Amino acid sequence: MQSYLSPAQHADLYDAENAWTAAEDFFLAFANEQPASRVLDLGCGTGRLTVALAGAGHTVTGVDPHLGSLDAARAKPGADAVRWIDGTSAALPEDASFDAVIMSSHVAQAIADERDWADTLRDVRAALVPGGRLVFDSRDPQARAWERWTPANTRSHLTLPDGTALQLWIDAAEREQGLVRITEHRFLADGKREFEDALLAFRSEPALRRDLADAGFTVVQVFGGWAGQPVGEGDGELIVIAHA
């Protein structure tokens, strides 16, 4: 569906809906365990975490396939310290070399196609130095978060920096086992209405461990929450740390 919002407004909407949380604290602390390292932020979005990583003294590359998001990222204070790449993991230079790769904001779930997911893990493995670290988050399907993504639970009102006012809500449905389609509905103050669909993959912990092993990774830890809780406790997450 054609959106009434510009790419810049979409980026502003993303930032309005996604504030800094304990998740970003976790990823930043993960990177800081190895000071002054070379970090890839894969699926960097509008670059909030990416710029913070650079500000913490790391050499950072941010990669995202959405030009509007990258434009917003490049406009953030401190963005000049980051190398920005338009595309997916396939766009990484052949000589790319990183000490750590971060995939935050459940970007792993947005790579819903299993072949694309396998390719992404292989690309990341090839770009990491021996012993390099990968961390990402994926919602635990056992928590069935999508059942709580209803209009009643997700309705909100936002005003973008340019004054555009929106009412938003989400609904979701399990399309088949492991795949959930979510729809964000937007009602603009001038009466225009639009929606945006997305497909998310809810992979189990055993499936993620298998996929990582197939790509040449060793899983070191899997947490269920941002305070390091075991899987099945905490925040309904699968926070995966693996080494190349």
Image (cartoon, rainbow, N blue to C red):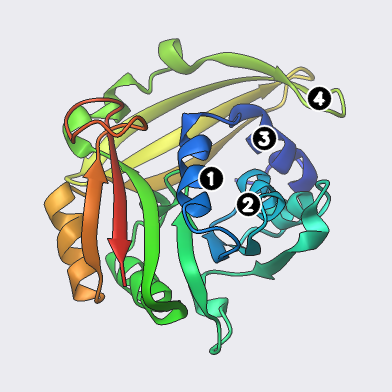
- Residue shown at 67% from the left, 70% from the top: 85
Q: Nearer the viewer, residue 232 or 155?
A: 232
Q: Position of residue 116 (x, y in %)?
A: 36, 69
- Residue shown at 24% from the left, 76% from the top: 216
Q: Say the numbered circle drawn on residue 15.
A: 3
Q: How many other residues sit within 10 Å of disc 3, few (<14), some (14-19) or many (≥20)?
A: some
* Residue occupied by mark 1: 28
Q: Nearer the viewer, mark 4 or mark 2?
A: 2
Q: Left or right? Give the position of 105 relative to 73.
A: left
Which callout, 3 or 2, points at the residue further toward the start of the chain?
A: 3
> Quick one: quadrant of the C terminus?
bottom left
Which callout, 4 or 2, points at the residue further toward the start of the chain?
A: 2
* Residue occupied by mark 2: 53
Q: Nearer the viewer, residue 203 or 219?
A: 219
Q: Nearer the viewer, mark 4 or mark 1?
A: 1
> Quick one: quadrant of the N terminus?
top right
Callout 1: helix, strand or loop? helix
In whole angstroms, how far apart are the C-alphas of marks 4 and 3? 14 Å
In whole angstroms, how far apart are the C-alphas of marks 2 and 1? 6 Å
